[in-house]
Amino acid sequence: MTDTSAAIVIRPSEEKDVEAMLAIYRSHIQRGVEPGAYHEEDTLQSDDLKRRRKNMKSKRLPHLAAELNGALVGYAYAVPFRKRPAYRFVAKHSIYVHSDYLRAGVGRVLLPGLVDSCAAAGFRQMIGYIDAANEASLRLHLACGFREVGRLPSIGYKFGKWTDSVMVQRSLGLGDQTPPDVWMVPGA
Ligand SMILES: CC(C)(COP(=O)(O)OP(=O)(O)OC[C@H]1O[C@@H](n2cnc3c(N)ncnc32)[C@H](O)[C@@H]1OP(=O)(O)O)[C@@H](O)C(=O)NCCC(=O)NCCS
């Protein structure tokens, strides 16, 4: 697909985006890429997504939408890596691009947008888990400054097969060079 990155607008998601975000999520469930694909039916409903979105926003966790010519073509968000306070400067993220707009440069704009938003919110590290067979996501993450830090063998089961997960990580802002800004409390 043609590179559309110059025309893509990244903005905080809004409640009116929820149906479009669900459609994107479900399209990937059907393609079998998303780990949720091992469920026979997708149980994520719009109320769940609305609740999750609000919950994240109240905790100052970025939840972003990518728009192209007025259409929602992708979304990405961060959640706390772990609940325990020592890990409060680490975000774990997800990214989804509409199946009709794959390989058009949306991910290359959206993922750095999420990285910048997480850094601005005071997070110092960002972590993602990627199915080892998900070449597109692995390459996108490596292109956006993430590196592979671990591999979790045989932890997923979908379509009759065990799957590995690759853990990727990148530092944000000053990373571990300085203590965190205590006045910024991500997830608080
Ligand atoms: C992974 C995903 C977000 C990539 O988004 P995208 O908008 O298609 O990616 P881009 O067009 O910006 O491509 C960025 C880079 O990623 C890599 N890439 C993207 N699609 C690829 C593919 N099908 N095969 C190989 N590499 C691919 C390339 O390195 C590409 O750069 P290049 O085009 O200059 O070679 C998208 O495929 C997606 O939503 N997949 C389903 C959901 C998912 O897997 N999310 C991630 C869960 S961890």
Image (spheres, rainbow, N blue to C red):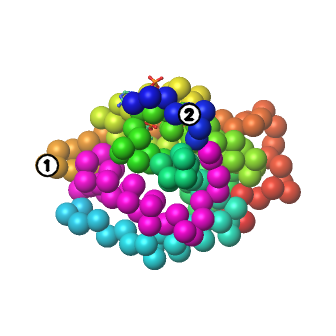
Name the residue type under label 1. Answer: Gly
- The relative height of residue 92 versus residue 59 in the rendered view (above or below) is above
Q: How many marks?
A: 2
Q: Residue at x 59, y 53 (%)?
A: 64
Q: Which residue is mark 1?
A: 160
Q: Which of the image's four quarters has the C terminus? A: bottom right
Who comes first in sequence, dot 2 or dot 1?
2
- The relative height of residue 70 versus residue 19 in the rendered view (above or below) is above
Residue 153 showing in the rendered view: no
Classify residue 146 by image quadrant: top right
| Lateral position of residue 84 relative to residue 177, left or right | left
The secondary element bearing badge 1 is classed as loop
Indicate yes or no: mark 2 CB to ligand 1 under 8 Å: yes
Label 2: how many residues lie within 10 Å, few (<14), some (14-19) or many (20+)? some
- Residue 99 percent location from the top left of the image: 36, 45
Q: Residue at x 52, y 63 (%)?
A: 17
Furthest-left residue in this view: 160
